[in-house]
Image (cartoon, grey):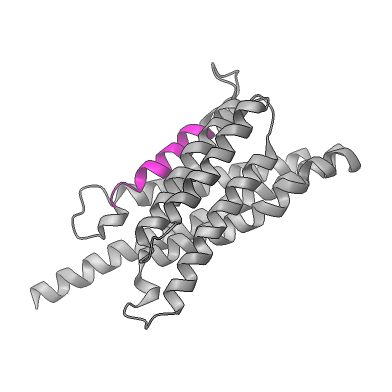
Amino acid sequence: MSQIKNYILYFQGIVVFISFVFSLLLINNKKIPKYMRGFYWYCAAGILVGIPFFLPFDFYINPIFLNNISLIFHFSFLSLFMIRVTPKKKYLNIIFIFFLSLIVFFLSMGDLTQHLTYIFSISGLGLTFFCVVYYLQLFNTLPILNLFREPSFWIVNGVFFGMSLIVPLGASLEYFYIKLNYSFYLSFASVYAFCTVIMHIFFIKAFMCCNMNKKVSEGLKND
Protein backbone atom coordinates (compact mmCIF):
# COMPACT_ATOMS: atom_id res chain seq x y z
CA MET A 1 0.00 0.00 0.00
CA SER A 2 2.83 2.40 0.84
CA GLN A 3 4.30 1.78 -2.61
CA ILE A 4 1.02 2.78 -4.23
CA LYS A 5 1.01 5.91 -2.09
CA ASN A 6 4.50 6.78 -3.36
CA TYR A 7 3.43 6.33 -6.99
CA ILE A 8 0.45 8.62 -6.43
CA LEU A 9 2.69 11.20 -4.75
CA TYR A 10 5.12 11.13 -7.68
CA PHE A 11 2.26 11.47 -10.15
CA GLN A 12 0.99 14.47 -8.20
CA GLY A 13 4.44 16.04 -8.31
CA ILE A 14 4.69 15.56 -12.08
CA VAL A 15 1.28 17.14 -12.74
CA VAL A 16 1.98 20.11 -10.45
CA PHE A 17 5.36 20.63 -12.16
CA ILE A 18 3.75 20.57 -15.63
CA SER A 19 1.17 23.08 -14.40
CA PHE A 20 3.99 25.29 -13.14
CA VAL A 21 5.79 25.13 -16.50
CA PHE A 22 2.61 26.12 -18.36
CA SER A 23 2.01 28.96 -15.91
CA LEU A 24 5.46 30.39 -16.67
CA LEU A 25 4.31 30.98 -20.25
CA LEU A 26 1.97 33.67 -18.91
CA ILE A 27 4.82 35.82 -17.59
CA ASN A 28 5.06 39.17 -19.42
CA ASN A 29 2.18 38.11 -21.67
CA LYS A 30 0.11 41.28 -21.89
CA LYS A 31 -2.59 39.67 -24.06
CA ILE A 32 -3.93 37.41 -21.35
CA PRO A 33 -6.78 38.54 -19.04
CA LYS A 34 -5.58 40.72 -16.17
CA TYR A 35 -6.91 38.29 -13.59
CA MET A 36 -4.52 35.60 -14.91
CA ARG A 37 -1.41 37.73 -14.48
CA GLY A 38 0.55 36.53 -11.51
CA PHE A 39 -1.23 33.17 -11.29
CA TYR A 40 2.15 31.48 -11.71
CA TRP A 41 2.87 32.46 -8.09
CA TYR A 42 0.31 29.93 -6.93
CA CYS A 43 1.94 27.16 -8.97
CA ALA A 44 5.40 28.23 -7.79
CA ALA A 45 4.24 28.01 -4.17
CA GLY A 46 2.93 24.51 -4.85
CA ILE A 47 6.36 23.48 -6.12
CA LEU A 48 8.17 24.98 -3.12
CA VAL A 49 5.84 23.32 -0.62
CA GLY A 50 6.01 19.97 -2.40
CA ILE A 51 9.79 19.69 -2.84
CA PRO A 52 10.56 18.71 0.81
CA PHE A 53 8.27 15.67 0.51
CA PHE A 54 10.45 14.28 -2.30
CA LEU A 55 13.87 14.92 -0.73
CA PRO A 56 15.74 11.78 0.45
CA PHE A 57 17.08 13.66 3.48
CA ASP A 58 15.60 15.64 6.37
CA PHE A 59 14.66 19.14 5.33
CA TYR A 60 15.44 22.08 7.60
CA ILE A 61 11.68 22.69 7.93
CA ASN A 62 9.20 19.93 8.70
CA PRO A 63 7.34 19.33 5.38
CA ILE A 64 4.04 18.80 7.18
CA PHE A 65 4.51 22.09 9.08
CA LEU A 66 5.23 23.87 5.80
CA ASN A 67 2.20 22.29 4.16
CA ASN A 68 -0.09 23.35 7.02
CA ILE A 69 1.17 26.94 7.01
CA SER A 70 0.85 27.16 3.22
CA LEU A 71 -2.88 26.57 3.62
CA ILE A 72 -3.27 30.29 4.42
CA PHE A 73 -1.72 31.24 1.06
CA HIS A 74 -3.61 28.47 -0.77
CA PHE A 75 -7.01 29.59 0.50
CA SER A 76 -6.32 33.33 0.22
CA PHE A 77 -4.93 33.21 -3.31
CA LEU A 78 -7.70 31.07 -4.80
CA SER A 79 -10.50 32.83 -2.89
CA LEU A 80 -9.37 36.29 -3.95
CA PHE A 81 -9.01 35.05 -7.53
CA MET A 82 -12.61 33.82 -7.58
CA ILE A 83 -13.88 37.00 -5.94
CA ARG A 84 -12.08 38.96 -8.66
CA VAL A 85 -13.76 37.03 -11.51
CA THR A 86 -17.23 36.99 -9.91
CA PRO A 87 -19.29 39.97 -11.16
CA LYS A 88 -21.33 40.68 -8.02
CA LYS A 89 -18.97 40.74 -5.04
CA LYS A 90 -21.45 41.78 -2.34
CA TYR A 91 -20.65 40.08 0.98
CA LEU A 92 -17.96 37.89 -0.61
CA ASN A 93 -15.13 39.73 1.14
CA ILE A 94 -16.87 39.18 4.47
CA ILE A 95 -17.21 35.44 3.75
CA PHE A 96 -13.53 35.38 2.79
CA ILE A 97 -12.48 36.98 6.09
CA PHE A 98 -14.73 34.57 8.01
CA PHE A 99 -13.19 31.41 6.53
CA LEU A 100 -9.67 32.82 6.69
CA SER A 101 -10.15 33.62 10.37
CA LEU A 102 -11.34 30.06 11.01
CA ILE A 103 -8.29 28.64 9.25
CA VAL A 104 -5.84 30.85 11.14
CA PHE A 105 -7.57 30.14 14.46
CA PHE A 106 -7.50 26.34 14.09
CA LEU A 107 -3.92 26.42 12.79
CA SER A 108 -2.88 28.38 15.88
CA MET A 109 -4.63 25.84 18.12
CA GLY A 110 -3.35 22.69 16.41
CA ASP A 111 -0.06 20.83 16.24
CA LEU A 112 1.44 22.13 12.99
CA THR A 113 3.80 19.16 12.74
CA GLN A 114 0.81 16.82 12.26
CA HIS A 115 -1.61 16.50 9.34
CA LEU A 116 -4.50 18.82 10.28
CA THR A 117 -6.96 17.36 7.81
CA TYR A 118 -10.04 19.04 9.29
CA ILE A 119 -8.55 22.47 8.54
CA PHE A 120 -8.09 21.48 4.90
CA SER A 121 -11.75 20.53 4.97
CA ILE A 122 -12.66 24.04 6.20
CA SER A 123 -10.54 25.57 3.45
CA GLY A 124 -12.14 23.32 0.84
CA LEU A 125 -15.61 24.26 2.07
CA GLY A 126 -14.86 27.97 1.74
CA LEU A 127 -13.42 27.56 -1.75
CA THR A 128 -16.36 25.41 -2.83
CA PHE A 129 -18.71 28.14 -1.61
CA PHE A 130 -17.00 30.75 -3.82
CA CYS A 131 -17.17 28.34 -6.78
CA VAL A 132 -20.93 27.87 -6.32
CA VAL A 133 -21.47 31.65 -6.17
CA TYR A 134 -19.46 32.00 -9.39
CA TYR A 135 -21.54 29.30 -11.13
CA LEU A 136 -24.85 30.78 -9.97
CA GLN A 137 -23.99 34.23 -11.26
CA LEU A 138 -22.52 32.83 -14.47
CA PHE A 139 -25.51 30.70 -15.46
CA ASN A 140 -28.12 33.22 -14.33
CA THR A 141 -26.90 35.72 -16.91
CA LEU A 142 -26.82 35.54 -20.66
CA PRO A 143 -23.59 33.89 -21.87
CA ILE A 144 -21.41 36.56 -23.44
CA LEU A 145 -18.23 34.50 -23.53
CA ASN A 146 -17.16 31.22 -25.01
CA LEU A 147 -16.69 29.36 -21.73
CA PHE A 148 -14.50 26.72 -23.31
CA ARG A 149 -11.98 29.46 -24.09
CA GLU A 150 -12.44 31.36 -20.83
CA PRO A 151 -9.49 30.72 -18.46
CA SER A 152 -11.40 31.75 -15.32
CA PHE A 153 -14.05 29.12 -16.03
CA TRP A 154 -11.45 26.34 -16.07
CA ILE A 155 -9.69 27.66 -12.96
CA VAL A 156 -12.97 27.66 -11.02
CA ASN A 157 -13.80 24.17 -12.35
CA GLY A 158 -10.45 22.92 -11.09
CA VAL A 159 -10.96 24.43 -7.65
CA PHE A 160 -14.52 23.10 -7.45
CA PHE A 161 -13.81 19.49 -8.43
CA GLY A 162 -10.60 19.35 -6.43
CA MET A 163 -11.67 21.11 -3.23
CA SER A 164 -15.23 19.76 -3.00
CA LEU A 165 -13.74 16.26 -2.69
CA ILE A 166 -11.47 17.41 0.12
CA VAL A 167 -14.40 18.61 2.28
CA PRO A 168 -15.79 15.17 3.22
CA LEU A 169 -12.35 13.57 3.07
CA GLY A 170 -10.73 15.99 5.51
CA ALA A 171 -13.68 15.82 7.87
CA SER A 172 -13.63 12.01 8.08
CA LEU A 173 -9.95 11.13 7.74
CA GLU A 174 -9.21 11.07 11.47
CA TYR A 175 -12.13 8.67 11.96
CA PHE A 176 -10.72 6.31 9.33
CA TYR A 177 -7.30 6.60 10.96
CA ILE A 178 -8.79 5.08 14.10
CA LYS A 179 -11.02 2.50 12.42
CA LEU A 180 -8.93 1.30 9.45
CA ASN A 181 -5.71 -0.63 9.13
CA TYR A 182 -2.88 1.90 8.72
CA SER A 183 -2.00 0.69 5.21
CA PHE A 184 -5.60 1.21 4.09
CA TYR A 185 -5.60 4.60 5.80
CA LEU A 186 -2.56 5.62 3.73
CA SER A 187 -4.34 4.61 0.53
CA PHE A 188 -7.46 6.51 1.56
CA ALA A 189 -5.37 9.56 2.42
CA SER A 190 -3.80 9.41 -1.04
CA VAL A 191 -7.09 10.72 -2.41
CA TYR A 192 -5.73 14.10 -1.30
CA ALA A 193 -3.14 13.79 -4.05
CA PHE A 194 -5.84 13.05 -6.62
CA CYS A 195 -7.70 16.20 -5.55
CA THR A 196 -4.58 18.26 -6.28
CA VAL A 197 -4.04 16.43 -9.58
CA ILE A 198 -7.61 17.15 -10.70
CA MET A 199 -7.27 20.82 -9.82
CA HIS A 200 -3.99 21.32 -11.67
CA ILE A 201 -5.19 19.48 -14.78
CA PHE A 202 -7.94 22.10 -15.05
CA PHE A 203 -5.34 24.81 -14.40
CA ILE A 204 -3.28 23.51 -17.32
CA LYS A 205 -6.37 23.78 -19.52
CA ALA A 206 -6.80 27.40 -18.37
CA PHE A 207 -3.17 28.21 -19.23
CA MET A 208 -3.64 26.62 -22.66
CA CYS A 209 -6.73 28.78 -23.21
CA CYS A 210 -4.64 31.88 -22.48
CA ASN A 211 -2.10 30.94 -25.13
CA MET A 212 -4.84 29.89 -27.56
CA ASN A 213 -6.60 33.24 -27.20
CA LYS A 214 -3.27 34.99 -27.72
CA LYS A 215 -2.70 33.15 -31.02
CA VAL A 216 -6.25 33.94 -32.16
CA SER A 217 -5.82 37.66 -31.42
CA GLU A 218 -2.46 37.69 -33.23
CA GLY A 219 -4.01 35.94 -36.22
CA LEU A 220 -6.81 38.50 -36.42
CA LYS A 221 -4.28 41.32 -36.21
CA ASN A 222 -2.25 39.85 -39.08
CA ASP A 223 -5.40 39.54 -41.20
Residue 123 percent location from the top left of the image: 58, 46
Quadrant of res 153? bottom left
Q: Quadrant of the N terminus?
A: top right
Relative depth, front residue between 165 and 207 = 165
- Residue at 22% in and 72% down: 216
* Farthest bottom residue in view: 142
Residue 56 percent location from the top left of the image: 60, 23
Quadrant of res 43? top left
Whether 193 is drawn above or below 149: the answer is above
Quadrant of res 151? bottom left
Relative depth, front residue between 142 and 40 = 142
Q: How many marks?
A: 0
Left or right of 92 in this view: 117: right
Residue 222 percent location from the top left of the image: 9, 73
Residues in magenta, as a range? 37-50
Q: Quadrant of the C terminus?
A: bottom left
Left or right of 55 in this view: 87: left
Relative depth, front residue between 185 and 95 = 95
Secondary structure that dominates the magenta span: helix
Residue 208 percent location from the top left of the image: 36, 62
Please say whether residue 68 is one of the residues in the magenta stretch. no
- Residue at 50% in and 62% down: 131
